[in-house]
Amino acid sequence: MEKHEIDHLVKNYLEHDNRHSSNLKHYVIKFFLNEKEILNISKWEFHHNDFVRWLDQVGQLKDKNKTLSLGTKRNCLAALNSFYKWLSLQGIIESKRI
């Protein structure tokens, strides 16, 4: 899969459910596509621990000197799980959960 294809999937998902829009775009997609450069969504599950550790270190959007709150970290995991569920319902990946 190419980056523009994943961007298209994200866009379609957010049209379906935009509750996690900010966390999905700014943290989940940023980590897997920019930090890890993993274009195969089925391989993301092998990097869940890295993602959680990265969330402990990454700065907030509004203040890069502050780390994410526990609530934001949980929302990022919820965003990833919700995206996985939608991808599974679309037949793109097998059901996954972090």
Image: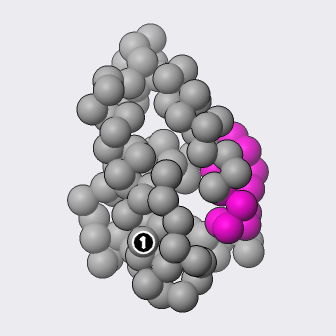
Location of residue 57 in the rendering, given as x and y in whole percent from the top left corner: 54, 20
Nearest the camera: 28 or 15?
28
Please determine whether, in this image, residue 79 is positioned above or below residue 89.
Answer: above
Nearest the camera: 89 or 19?
89
Magenta stretch, residue numbers = 32-44
Residue occupying image coordinates x 42% and y 71%: 85
Residue type at mark 1: give it.
Answer: Lys
Residue occupying image coordinates x 35% and y 51%: 78
Please determine whether, in this image, residue 64 is positioned above or below residue 74.
Answer: above
Outermost bottom residue: 91
Location of residue 94 in the rendering, given as x and y in whole percent from the top left corner: 58, 77
Location of residue 61 in the rendering, given as x and y in whole percent from the top left corner: 39, 30
Asked where in the image residue 53 lies, by quadrant, the reply is: top right
Whether residue 23 is visible here, answered yes or no, is no
> Taken as a whole, is the magenta stretch helix, strand or loop?
helix
Identify the residue under disc 1: 85
Q: How many marks?
A: 1
The N terminus is located in which quarter? bottom right
Nearest the camera: 68 or 43?
43
Please determine whether, in this image, residue 2 is positioned above or below residue 61.
Answer: below
Residue 38 sits inside the magenta stretch? yes
Asked where in the image residue 14 lies, by quadrant, the reply is: bottom left
Residue occupying image coordinates x 69% and y 40%: 35
At numbered mark 1, what does the secondary structure look like: helix, strand or loop? Answer: helix
Residue 61 sits inside the magenta stretch? no
Report crowding for label 1: few under 14, some 14 to 19, many 20 or more residues within 10 A (C-alpha): some
Please determine whether, in this image, residue 82 is positioned above or below residue 72.
Answer: below
Whether residue 84 is visible here, answered yes or no, is yes
**Direction from residue 65 to residue 34 in the image, left or right:** right
